[in-house]
Amino acid sequence: MKLTLKIWRQKSPKDKGRFETYKVEASPHMSFLEMLDVLNEELISKKEEPVTFEHDCREGICGTCGLVINGQPHGPNKGTATCQLHMRFYKDGDIIVIEPYRASAFPVLKDLAVDRSAFDRIIQAGGYISVSTGAPQDGNAIPIEKDQAAKSFDAAACIGCGACVAACPNASAMLFVSAKVSHLALLPQGKVEAQRRAQAMVRQMDEEGFGMCSNVTACEVECPKEISVTNIARLNREYLSASLGSEV
Amino acid sequence: MNVKGNQSVESFHRRLGKIMWDYCGMSRNADSMKKYRKMIQELREEFYKDVFIPGSMNDYNPELEKAQRVADFFELGELMVVDALDRNESCGGHFREEYQSEEGEALRNDEDYAYVSAWEYKGWDQDPVLHKEELIFENIELKTRSYK
């Protein structure tokens, strides 16, 4: 299948950047990233600079890839990352526009690669449990309701890819932060520090320049792990009760 | 970076991978490995003469990063062949075609090879030096595992 790609090229964080058009011949069996590999091999054979894009596991668990494809983070399919998108979802002759995430808290490093270290700093601000919880416990030693465990697990499915930020008109990181806060706050080991954690992570999120949440819920739609916006409600509750009850 | 040749890093990675897959996969034998150890060395020489790394050294350059990894893979790949040649027995994921039972099962040689091989790097054009870390079993006796 023959495709026309309009790809964002930007040499460095300071470069203005522009779209460049490329033609590529792909097989429907290829993944989207493999199609970009083919394009890059062609560019290299012509002594041109390949398109920089991030990737690692290529099986939807690491959160490294994340392209905005025809305006949608991770492309058109629901509940999958860019690496899980295959060319069979496109037709011969299609024009595909590929951009990096657009958010001031995620500056473009080069072409399609953005700097997502703001997420790391949010995690460093409180996305952990400070006490040593020791070796794995016997499964039944701490009884946790099934419902509670399932909610925590669903939140823990977040791979930190940042698609929620890219999908949000305010470039808010609330879905990411709420998933991390929920996954820990719902379990007994994480409950102790839940309020302090919510405050610290929200403070860092604001410092990084992410926008506010205005309940657009585009984040939930684009999330490759289908993290629910109910986590944002939980974060708001934790944050509010922490603010009201905090020691001055 | 300064080679400025004509072949991509990826193409070398694939060629090295094919050699490893074909001749130093789970099932390997001494004759072909001896031949292909030389092929890896030749491919490595070709890499340093004809690789093309686009971009520059001071920018974010994933191709340069990949080139550094592939350069390491040449050494690691050759070391895997050296180690597989040294171990004249079949054991676990190392199946030497010369050492198998009549039924085609792996044939271990605990008398000579009950050790972990630690190879010391002596420079990229030198043979590595073997240090044996003996495996000593005090409470159990080594036996052949059978699923039959």
Image (cartoon, helix red, strand yellow):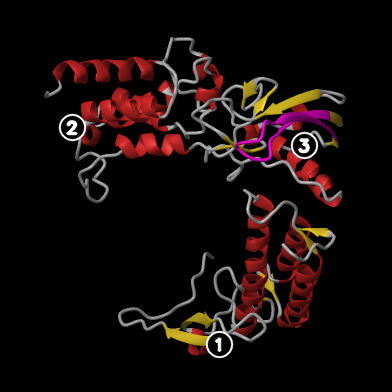
Where A217 sits versus B136, above or below?
Answer: above
Using the image as rendered, state which of residue B104 and residue B38 is in the foreground. Answer: B38
Residue annotated with mark 2: A192
* Residue plotted at (68% across, 60% down): B67
Count of number-bearing discs: 3
Q: Is mark 1 on a helix, strand or loop?
A: strand
The span from disc 2 to disc 1 (Cα, nearest Å) is 54 Å
Which chain is mark 1 on?
B
Give residue A121's position: percent from left, percent from top: 38, 38
Q: In the image, what residue type sits under mark 3?
A: His
Residue annotated with mark 3: A29
* Left or right of B96 on screen, residue B130: left
Q: Give the range drawn in magenta.
A: A4-23
Give residue A132's position: percent from left, percent from top: 21, 47
The span from disc 3 to disc 1 (Cα, nearest Å) is 45 Å
Q: What element carries label 3?
A: loop
Q: Are marks 2 and 1 on the same chain?
A: no
By secondary structure, the bulk of the magenta-drawn segment is best described as strand
Using the image as rendered, state which of residue A85 and residue A167 is in the foreground. Answer: A167
Residue A7 in the magenta stretch? The answer is: yes
The quarter of the picture where residue A221 lies is: top right
Callout 2 environment at 10 Å: few (<14), some (14 to 19), or many (20+)?
some
Residue furthest to the top in view is A215
